[in-house]
Every structure is written in structure tokens, then in C-alpha cells.
Image (tube, coloured by chain):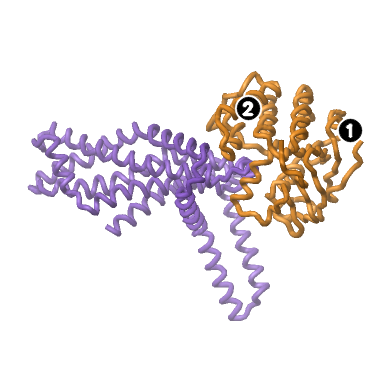
Amino acid sequence: MNTYSGPMLEFLEARPSFEDSGLPPVPFSARVMPGDCIIVECRDAERAAMFADMCSGMVSLQSGAIRFMGLDWSELRYRQMNALRGRIGRMVGTQCWSDRYGAHYSMMLKVIYHTGRSMEEVTDEAIRLSERFGLPGLPVSLPSQMSSADKVRASCVRAFIGKPHLVLISDPLAKGEADLAAPLISSIVEAMDRGAAVLWFVRNLSARTDYSQVKTGLWHLTDEGLSSGRSS
Amino acid sequence: MSTGEQPPSGSRDEADSDDRELLHAAEEKEHGDTPGGRFARFLGRIGHQVRHHLWFFLVTLGAGWGVVSESLRRTSWRRTVLFEFGSTLREVTMGGLFSTLVSGMLAGVSVVSQMIYWLGFAGMDEKTGSLLVMIDVREVAPILVGILMLGRSGMLTFTELGLLTTSGQTRALIADGVDPLLQIVMPRTLAYMIAGLTLGIQFSLASLVTGYAVSRASGAVSNPIWTFLYDVITAMTPHDYLFIPLKFIVVGFLVGLGCCIGGLTASSSDTISTMMPRGFSRGMLIVMAVSVIFSLNL
């Protein structure tokens, strides 16, 4: 259970640099509290990935600030930023699947890198999540040898492993992985119950009804910036 | 050749030319055509060229300092970093051992045995040990080991990291809070450094023993191998004991660092066909430069 009770993610009039990100250079103001699951409707996958980078403090700002767990990204040193990013689970945009090692290593890398948890404990969690998302076990084959469907499932495991405080996920359901809906929803609910916040990027909100099961807020990310929608 | 068949490097050069033209136009607009403006443009062009050619050198220098300083921090040696270090060390050392031993044996036949023969022919047997140390161990071994490491493992590292960077996977690592300098550059560079020393010693031993065996078989020497090796060891000065290992270490360090940084600084327009030649030429330059610098100092 997370002990942090303040806003998990805050955009304080944050105006991204258009040259760096391609995001509209307008002020973003929003707040995500622990236990929230915000559906972010965004038609453009690249813009969604860049917005996820912005949440992770990887986009320079012209003005304003973005705070994660009360800490302003721009005031942190490089090591501190990396430590904080270790508390974010994400499956938005490009992911690192190095063929140098098996897929299991890429899935567990972040947790092993950032924490001192024992290998047995991390492996057990990875196996549990893998089975929940429909994999036959922890995939040890090279990422290039995995099917795209298995890679999506492995990406889901990677997003939720290590009990992150903020989860940024793209929409695996939109890729036709309908059987992922139940494990994804249960993982999101589990994360919300322990006090994590979730940003779920979807292309078309009206395409599926699964989102309403966990949705506590709705944002639209468009050319005009970020706007709030009505939660049903 | 049609335009579509031109190599990507051509378009890169054209882009560089365009950049220069735009820079020139901007300078002219800013400074006008006065003597002061022309001088400013002249300085600007020099600066542009210096930055362009020294960019990689400066980046490598900075990363080298980063590797050394980070390696001294206990917190840098996380489990994943240790794992990366161990696997790279195993790959570079074990993967390059056979080719290093064969190259050492060939060098033994072509360099060591010839030297023993001709020094004996000239009646300068007493110089054999010192000349073998000076030429074979100090000059030939670091260059050949550096080239072998570059070709056997370095190019693989360069290409692998280049493809990770151009496909955006390095950025994905950063998004996960995994520092590429800490996770990739530091452990691999240090693994190359240790592998350089290990392979350098293997190469030297293989060439000396093979050279002795060939000379013994041809009748050029009649001493037992222990006497031959004793002559070589006693010919080494305290300087040699310090600088020969140091040369192997520096060659390994810089080959590893250059390949890691070269891969991580690949641009989005880079492909394997542009990365491979650039990586090889830079690596060769590093190996030769280290050899020359050490030779000048000694």
C-alpha cells in the first residue's frame, strides 16, 4: 500500500516545448490523485507517447511545472529523476526489447535495477503477472522470437511489475487483444486499490465499454492541448 | 547511377553542406560585409569545423570521465550493471580468445622467429630479449589485440547500440529511469578494458612461445624455453612493467568506450551501412592513436 497521499501527478500551467516534443505549446493544468484512473483519449499514438514522456519529466517546458509525487521534475538532479522514473510503469510508445538477453530479463530489468528485492521475489511476481496476462509462464526466449501478441502481454507485465506508483498504459484492447480486458482491468483495479494512479491512453473511447469499469476521470489530448471530459 | 542508388552518406554530406550554407547566410545577415563581419564569419567557420571534427572526441572524453567517476561509486554497481559487466567480459574475452591465440601464433612465426633468426645471423643475440619486448610485446601486441577486439566484439556493440538508439529503445530505457551510461557504457567499457589486458597477455605469450618453437625447430636457438623467457623478462625495464599493461588497458578501455558512445550517438538517419564503416574507422583511429601516443612517451 502506498503511503503517499498528495497528488500523484500535477501539471501546473506546464507549457511543453513544441520543438522538443511536438506537443501543442499551450499550458497544461491537471491533477491525478492516488487511486485515480484517468482515461486519456488521444487519436495520435505518437502524441500519446510524447505526453507520457512529459509525465515522466522527459520533455523540456517553456514555463510551468510538472510534479510527480510532489517533486518538480525540473528541480531534480539526474540520478533523482532516474530514481523517480523507476516508480512509473509504462507501456506507451517504443519499449526496449534487447535481443542480447531473454525477454524475461527485459521484463524484470527495471525492478532489478531500481530495487534491492531478491531475484526470487521479482521472478515470482513476474511469473504471477505473466500467467495472469495469458502467457504460459515467464518468457525466456529472445524478444525477436516472440509473437506480437505475446509481446503485448509481456509489455503489460512490464508495466505492472514492481508495484509502480503511476502506470502509463496504451490500449492493448484496441489491437484486438480482447482477452486481455479482464486481466488488464483487474491489474488496474489492484493498482488503484494500493494507491497508484493510472493514465490509460485510448484512441477511441466509444469503441469499447471496458474503460468505464475503472474510469475516474476523462481527458482529451488534442491539437488544442489537454481538456477534461465528463466521467460517466 | 540514379539518384535513388546513392548511399545514405551522400545525403548526409549534402545535409552538412546545406547546414554550412545556412550558417553562412545567417552569419552574413548578422555581421554584414564589413571587415569585422568577415573576421567574425572566419572565426565562426573555424569554430564550426573544430566543433564538427572534435565533437566525437569531446563526447568520448566526457563519457570516459563519466565512466571512471561512476565506477568509483559503490551505488553504481547495481545487480543489472554487474550482470552486464560479467556477460560482456565473458563475450569479449572468451569470444576473442581463439582468434587472439591464432593471431599471436602467426605473429610468433612472422615476427618473433624472424627477429631471432636475423639477430642471431648478425651476431646480436644479446639484444634479442629487449628487441622482442620493444617490438612484439610493446608495439605489435596492443595494435593487433585492439584491432581484434574491435572487429570481433566492438563492431557488434557499436551496431547493437546504434540500432537500439535509432529505434528509440535507448529513450525507452531512460523513460524507465535506467541510465544508459550506468547500465550500458560503464560496464561494457570496463569489461573491454580488462579483456584488453587479458587478451594482450595471451597474445604476447602465444607469439613468444610460437616464435621460440619455430626458431628451435629451425635450429636458430638451442637454449631451453625457460632461458629464452628469462632473457625476455630480464630485458624488461620497470617502465615496461608499468606501461605495457597500461597500454593494453587503455586500448581496451577506448575501444569499448568508442564503440558504446558511437552507437549511442547514432542519429535517426543512420543505418547499419553508415554505422559500420564509421565505427570501424573510428575504432582503428583510436587503436593507432593510443599506440602512437604511448610510443612517443616511451
Chain B display color = purple
Where is residue B248 shown, x and y percent of the image?
33, 46
Choose mark 2 or mark 1, whichever is in front. 2
Where is residue B10 shown, x and y percent of the image?
57, 50
Q: CA distance from mark 2 to mark 1?
A: 32 Å
Q: How many marks?
A: 2
Residue B12 horizontal side relative to residue A67, left or right: left
The residue under the point 29% across, 59% down is B297
Q: Locate the N terminus of chain B by quadrant.
A: top right
Write down the quadrant of residue A110 in the picture.
Answer: top right
The residue under the point 49% across, 58% down is B58
Question: On residue A126, which mark appears?
Answer: 2
The residue furthest top is: A136
Where is residue A159 shown, x and y percent of the image?
69, 34
Which residue is the site of mark 1?
A206
Residue A34 horizontal side relative to residue B226, left or right: right
Label 2 marks a residue whose chain is: A
Q: Give the amino acid at mark 1.
A: Ser
Write down the quadrant of residue B151 in the picture.
Answer: top left
From the rendered image, report the letter of the chain displayed in orange.
Answer: A
Q: Residues within 10 Å of mark 1 (few under 14, many from 20)?
A: few
Q: Nearer the viewer, residue A43 or B113?
A: A43
